[in-house]
Image: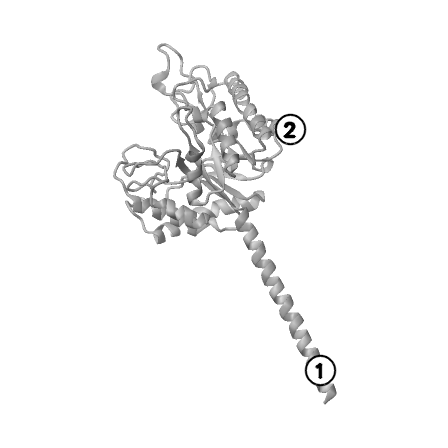
Amino acid sequence: MRGIKIIKRTINLKCAISLFLLFTAIYISISQHNMISADKIEGVNFIGPYEDILEPYMMEDIKMVHAEWIALIPGAIMSRTTLEISTKNNRIGWYESAAGIEKSIQISQNLGFRIMLKPHIVLQYVEDIPTGAIDKTDNTEWRGSYVASDENDWKLLEDNYRNFIIPYAQMAEDYQVELFCIGTELREFVISRPYYWNQLIEEIRKIYTGKICYSANWDGFEKIPLWDKLDYVGLNSYFPLSKKDTPSIKNLNNKWKEVKKSIYTLSQEKNKKIIFTEFGWRNVDASGKEPWIHNAGLHKSNYKIQSNLYSAFFESIWNEPWVAGGFCWDWNYKTVDVSDTNFHINNKPAAKILAKYYH
């Protein structure tokens, strides 16, 4: 009998040890999952005021959607006649200027946000070209399509872009900004001049010690030759998803299955996680058809499709382990009017979708 009791005790001890190890493994697994979730970049692209009126409460509202990151957007105009990249233009708001970005960084950090600096350049409006001046861009509509006509113009653009971007890399380092984006939607410039961009990355690395990425547009992101040199693949997610006025979430999820194959393939090939440097949709009919359109021909308000598009994005791709997170486009510094049909998400039903998944 004594031998039987000893055997039972031994079995019970082994069972206890096995259960302990099992629960420990489960606990570690859950903890690691929570750590990954906690590290997910949950951010918004912040659109600030055109005048120097920024106050902390204008950014603090972002916490309503549980965002922990803010993308700040240094801006400049690229001249069509000289290829100069300048902030001295009445179309550039204060929030895009060096002074505006610096103040925005200070306020953001005081509020506990982590930051990505994501510089944008936009082409000079055609109507702003001086009479008689030669348009070096040949009336190119979008910055990503611009191709210089000769080597001299390429060199000029490269020098101008370097002079624009390097001071912001230094600012990012001075303020210990967590993430720096070296460019946004400059497709042909990047594809045509990889040597320049590789040299620029090396120069930025000597100045800035944080993580860096590049923000590619949804079309042609596979062709960008820089991914091996960067910490993340940055992607602006304006994929065409549906021609319907109000597609269902199920319909959109099915479309995402097709879209995310190429994103996943690139992530695996480059061994880099994806950051959606921009994702967002307007609250207008058929805003999933050509999501990049800001105003042309789309005026009828439709909050349902905006909410469905946000829901499908989060349901379809957000929780993939190869997605590092992202920044919705966009959050406005002021309360958005109910009649607004732009990308601004604050004060709209879709903000609840964002808050649900960020939370």
Q: Can residue 242 be seen in this view?
A: no
Q: Residues within 10 Å of mark 2 (few under 14, many from 20)?
A: few
Mark 1 or mark 2: whose residue is earlier in sequence? 1
Residue most extreme to the top: 132
Q: Please tell me the numbered disc located at residue 318.
A: none
Question: According to the image, what is the colour scheme of the structure?
Answer: one colour
The answer to which image quadrant residue 46 occupies is top left
Q: Return the x and y of residue 175 as percentages of the image width and height.
A: 57, 30
Residue 96 vertical placement versus 288 (above, below) = above
Q: Distance between the residues labelled 1 and 2?
A: 66 Å
Q: Quadrant of residue 31?
A: bottom right
Which residue is most to the left? 300
The residue positioned farthest toward the right in the image shown: 3
Q: Relative to residue 12, is residue 114 depicted above or below?
A: above
Identify the disc placed on residue 206: 2
Tell which of 348 and 238 is nearer to you: 348
Residue 148, position in %: x, y?
47, 21
Kind of residue sitting beneath label 1: Ile
Q: Are marks 1 and 2 in contact (CB under 8 Å)?
A: no
Quadrant of residue 16 within the rendered picture? bottom right
Residue 1 image position (x, y, % from top left): 72, 90
Q: Label 1, on which residue?
A: 7
Specify whether 9 is left or right of 337: right
Name the residue type under label 2: Lys
| Residue 332 visible to an observer of this rendering | yes
Q: Dot 2: what SS?
A: helix
User: How far across and down, in percent of the image, does residue 291 sit?
Assistant: 36, 39
Task: Say left or right for 153 vs 281.
Answer: right
Quick one: 153 or 250, which is closer to the camera? 250
**Residue at left offset 27%, top offset 34%:** 297
Residue at the far bottom in the pictured view: 1
